[in-house]
Image (cartoon, helix red, strand yellow):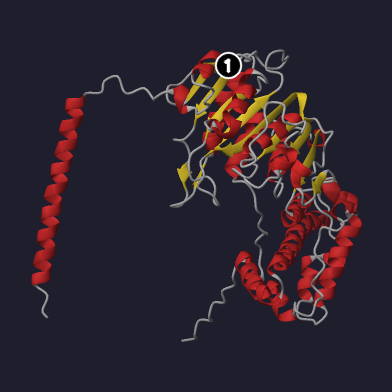
Amino acid sequence: MARKPKEIKTDPLEVILWKAADKLRKNIDAAEYKHVVLGLIFLKYISDSFESHYELLKAGEGEFAGADPEDKDEYTAYNVFFVPELARWNYLISKAKLPEIGKLIDDAMELIEAGNPQLKGVLPKVYARQNLDATILGEFALAEGKQGGQFYTPKSIVSLLVNMLEPYKGRVFDPCCGSGGMFVQSEKFVEAHQGNIDDISIYGQESNQTTWRLAKMNLAIRGINSEHVRWNNEGSFLNDAHKDLKSDFIIANPPFNVSDWSGEQLRGDARWQYGIPPAGNANFAWMQHFLYHLSPKGQAGVVLAKGALTSKSSGEGDIRAALVKDANVIDCIVNLPAKLFLNTQIPAALWFMRRDRENSSQYRDRSKEILFIDARNLGHLINRRTKVLSDDDIKTISDTYHNWRNKGGDYQDIAGFCASADINEVAELDYVLTPGRYVGLADEEDDFDFKERFTALKAEFEAQLEEETRLNKAIADNLAKVIL
């Protein structure tokens, strides 16, 4: 009988990338190796998208009849990144074992930057260095099919923010944009609702250069113009890259509770219209930075640590009160479930702000109210440590907000979940904005009978005790049969 050939197992791309990164760490500085890996992920990702579209153009069927697969415009029209021939993944993989592979990859990066000015100076060009040998780079030749990874705010939170704000048209701004996830989701939302992605323009700033590079690559992959996504290592507080910008939508997830944000240097800053934020916590510096950049009809949806809803230390309570009674911009607060974030256990909440709460032609007058939503019981665990919001959860929350905000919406308070609170009620609670203080407890069943419920639980408990006794006896009997 012929021996069955041994099955060859190939690691997925992310495993190969990690192995390569481990080897690279021994040869180059820790601050540099991630650029190397990200560059290769980028090349793989854009090549996969390019090759798929290339095959459609080459086949020349239907709408692609007569198309030239080497015409860059044929890719731009479909938001597909055009990859020059000598920068394509398959070409580079075919050369992976050659001594000059490093220079070929550097040349590929140069070619891509030359055809895409918004990426100039972004892509790494360090592959020709001697300590990046062909053995390490050759590991990537084994990669099959998987697309590269990215770093972002949990997708379900980004989706919730975007679905609640509905950024169909205008300027979208994220002053702490990370890898650009908010921008990507905004574009996806517009496309999903048959809108025109050219109707929105994105503006961003990021202080971490590695993350900024990733954002530029992330956006380029999807054909999103990142011309106005800027980097400087001083950050949005000390060096605002968009000082004159007034945006229609702000969608952001700033770092929680940052203590080292140069607050002492900015005590007299014009952005602090509602109080000087404490030097030891940037939460309300971010809030006022967002407001400063909102247009007269602008809206914002941001993630903050839950402590910002209640804190009164160092003037934070006064700033929060001013945002409610003086600025009159707080539209909705959503208390999020725990375990949504991978890298922090700090509980979080969403804040939604709106400039035109009183005289809007599109929305009803809610200038004397705030909507509170307690979503802590929504979401489901995907593993022991991580929870996500389902599409239905996102729809439940966003529909509640839209029905409350939009003219003609059918909104009703739901005990334990949502409540529209009058500003006077908020003032009576000293401007504490925790949703649980306003939504109350969920209604109990009208036919609840304590005696009946207690009797049933008691019977169930007694049955479990009897089962425990039976199992203990069975274990003892089996042990007695063991011959030592």
**Residue 349: x percent and y percent?**
55, 35
- Look at mark 1 in the image and give the residue it sits on: 369
Residue in front for this viewpoint, 376 or 207: 207
**Residue 11: x percent and y percent?**
59, 70
Task: Please report the residue visible at 61 percent of the width from the left and 21 percent of the height from the top.
Answer: 324
Q: Element under label 1?
A: strand
Q: Is residue 375 left or right of residue 83?
A: left
What count of labels does the image hold?
1
**Residue 473: x percent and y percent?**
9, 60
Vertical relation: 4 (above or below) 173 = below
**Residue 284: x percent and y percent?**
64, 34
Q: Residues within 10 Å of mark 1 (few under 14, many from 20)?
A: many
| Identity, as a three-letter code, of the amino acid under mark 1 | Glu
Quarter in which the C terminus is drawn: bottom left
Residue in front for this viewpoint, 197 or 57: 197
Vertical relation: 404 (above or below) 134 = above
Vertical relation: 91 (above or below) 323 = below
| Visible residue check, residue 402 | yes
Task: Please report the residue visible at 72 percent of the width from the left and 62 percent of the height from the top.
Answer: 38
Specify the quadrant of the image occupied by residue 247: top right
Vertical relation: 176 (above or below) 331 = below
| Visible residue check, residue 79 | no
